[in-house]
Amino acid sequence: MNNASTAPPKSRNSRFVPFFLILAVAVAIGFAIRHFKDKPYPTTGEGAWEVYFSKVDGNAYSLEKRLVAKLSFAQKRVDAALYDLDSAPIADALIDAHARGVSVRVFTENDNADQGEIERLQDEGVSVRDDGDNEGYMHHKFIVIDEQYVWTGSYNPTYNGSYKNNNNVIWIDSVPLAYNFTQEFQEMFVSAQLDRSSDPHIPFPHVSLNDGTQISTYFAPENDTISPLLKEITSAKKSIYFMAFSFTHDKLGKAMRDRFQLGVTMGGLFDESGLNAYSEYEPMQKAGIPVRVDRSSGAMHHKVIIIDEETVITGSYNFSKNAETRNSENLLIIKGNKDIARAYLDEFNRLK
């Protein structure tokens, strides 16, 4: 008589289910630990970008404090291309990063290389270079952190830039975009020693963020910046609003006047210091465009165009021939994100 159990044997698959389940959970936990361990910034729920304005009148959390906070999280590298730097807290944050083993490099404009904070960075061992006696300005105001995060806009990290002038910054989490800016920084940092010209090639000229935001990158003077600007202006269907510290570029001014004549709603804000014989203020005013001069005590230092309430043009780039052909500048054209456009439009409405 066969004493073996008559119960049906368990299938091989059923015996392996718990093993595979445990393995899958372990892999997921390991991935999560690695992801959050390697993430150099706490998640904020704000997505892959953040927009900041100085809001000089009653701003409790200044651009200076925001930048210090960003620098405090740096783990590997900080590359800072800064036209001017006289903020002691930001210099302290760069020195602190250097002291904890972060690779910190600063590139600045020759005319501002004798600033006390620049000299203090050098005294503390931070690698600092300037652009030498070039005919144009090293006018960038960008910082790349850990080869992943880009901070750029109109903001010079100075006392006036932080607490007197109206400025904007956009902070973007994007490895490809950071690579573009790192390459620009590297070219300038090396060319300061080897007298090389800048390479017009941009590794990732058009970057897409996870939320669908499209970002096109341009660096002057090596890239053609006027053609994409004109393309955006001439494609405007509903509205163009701008904030300009300096607006003297004839072609840009004419393109805006032409769109206004075709029925595109328009408004502009000029800084008082930019009103000269070359300014586009009077031609626009004569054309009937509702432009206004900001006469507040600090500078209206923005370099921003908002098109059809969904495209934003920003960066260090004043709307001038010098920005196009002489200065080292960066220009971002940001499309497909109405929240970003709304943030800049709210700033325009606040100031106008």
Image (cartoon, rainbow, N blue to C red):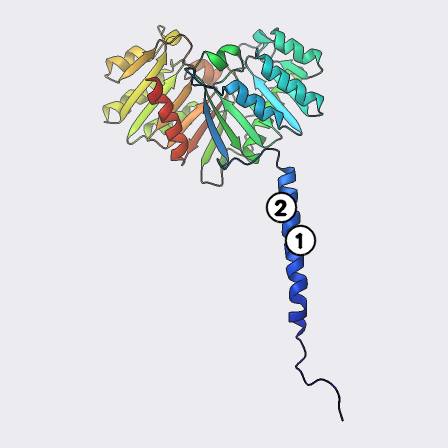
Q: Is residue 70 above or below residue 286?
A: below
Give me the residue at 29% from left, 10% from top.
Answer: 282
The amino acid marked with disc number 1 is: Ala
SS at badge 1: helix
Point out the tag, 2 or 1, that comes first from the N-terminus.
1
Q: Secondary structure at mark 2?
A: helix
Residue 177 visible, this angle: yes
- Residue placed at 60% from the left, 24% from the top? 71
Q: At which x and y percent is residue 312?
A: 40, 28
- Pointer 2 and pointer 1: residues touching (CB < 8 Å)? no
Residue type, label 2? Ala
Q: Which residue is mark 1?
A: 26
Can residue 184 be seen in this snapshot? no
**The label number, if any, that marks residue 305 in the structure image:** none
Residue linked to disc 2? 32
What residue is rendered at 41% in x and 31% in y? 340
Asked where in the image residue 182 lies, by quadrant, the reply is: top right
Crowding near pointer 2: few (<14 within 10 Å), some, many (20+)?
few
In which quadrant of the rendered image does the N terminus lie? bottom right
